[in-house]
Image (spheres, grey):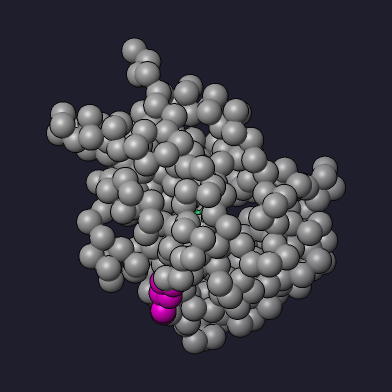
Amino acid sequence: MMNKIIIARNKSELNSGISQFRKNNETISLVPTMGALHDGHLKLVKLAKLKSDRTIVSIYVNPTQFAPGEDFELYPRTESNDINLLTHENVDIIYIPNPRSMYDEDHTTKIVVGGVAEGLETNHRPTFFEGVALIVTKLLNRIQPDYAIFGEKDYQQLATIRRLVDDLDIPVKVIGAEIARDNHGLALSSRNKYLNPNGLEIARKLNKIMISCANSMSKGTNVDEATQTAKAQLLKSGFSSVDYIEVRSPNSLTILEGGVLSSPARLLVAAHCQDVRLIDNYPIS
Ligand code: PAF
């Protein structure tokens, strides 16, 4: 049977839904999103529904995680389609806060996560994780879910949120969901829709090059040699630049020395194709 979906646009609409669930002793999962939903998000929603009695999906394009000159204004906004998709998934609340209600005009608090949030993305988007940490903390405080679900595509983001939640004693269990890919292995992303057919063809090579790089390191190829080869292959395949292709430890994202790997690790990559910045990652066993 379909639930009646609550579309909450302010705190009181949100709270009246949540208090009903809590009265019934029901558990709640939160799936935070910036909208422009695709099958990857819907996988997170399905996981949320398995974990808890009630599922809340937030849709909010968070300005504090975009630097000046990034695509905040142009970020795809597809609200009615998002609502249709979530209705089909039978979620309980879609939280679409009014943009002006999220931050006070004179807000000043910053949350800076060290360690896992350093390097990789931060070398290219220096204030990104501050913005993510702030909005995720605010959403967790407003909703107080039992579970919060994030995709592994944004692997450093997931590690950063785990660190934040542990360090600030936020009472929520963070769940990571496997990367959703198209039939060619391209990680699903809201920004993929900016690629034209030629760009899509190039983008679909990223995962193949990444997987072959990871496999060659598993078989004993030196990290520096394997990542340099992969970088050259990406550029040759049509990527305009590679922000990074690096190997880190899987949880703390500690930099691993450039020799031969002796324990499991994670390969992380960010590269540009037709003005679209693609990120992806893969386990090295
Ligand atoms: O991954 C995203 O879509 C965003 O960074 C998040 C976690 C919803 C915060 O705005």
Q: Which residues are magenta?
A: 110-116
Q: Residue furthest front?
A: 106
Q: Looking at the figure, which quarter contains the N terminus?
A: top left
What residue lies at 54% left-to-right and 79% top-to-bottom? 119
192 to 264, vertically: above or below: above
Horizontal side of residue 151 vs 211, given as left or right: left
Horizontal side of residue 202 vs 12, given as left or right: right
Residue 102 point in image, percent of width and height: 46, 52
Residue 69 point in image, percent of width and height: 73, 65
Does residue 203 appear in this view? yes
220 to 128, vertically: above or below: below
Q: Quadrant of residue 237?
A: bottom right
Residue closer to the observer: 89 or 280? 89
Q: Looking at the figure, which quarter contains the C terminus?
A: bottom left
The answer to if 153 sits in the magenta stretch is no
What residue lies at 47% left-to-right and 57% top-to-bottom? 103
What residue lies at 35% left-to-right and 18% top-to-bottom? 3
Residue 154 point in image, percent of width and height: 51, 58
What residue lies at 57% left-to-right and 38% top-to-bottom? 37
Horizontal side of residue 216 vs 255, given as left or right: right
Residue closer to the observer: 128 or 208? 128
138 to 53, vertically: above or below: below
Residue 15 point in image, percent of width and height: 30, 38
Residue closer to the observer: 207 or 71? 71
Magenta stretch, main secondary structure class: loop
Q: What is the number of callouts on the image? A: 0
Does residue 281 appear in this view? no
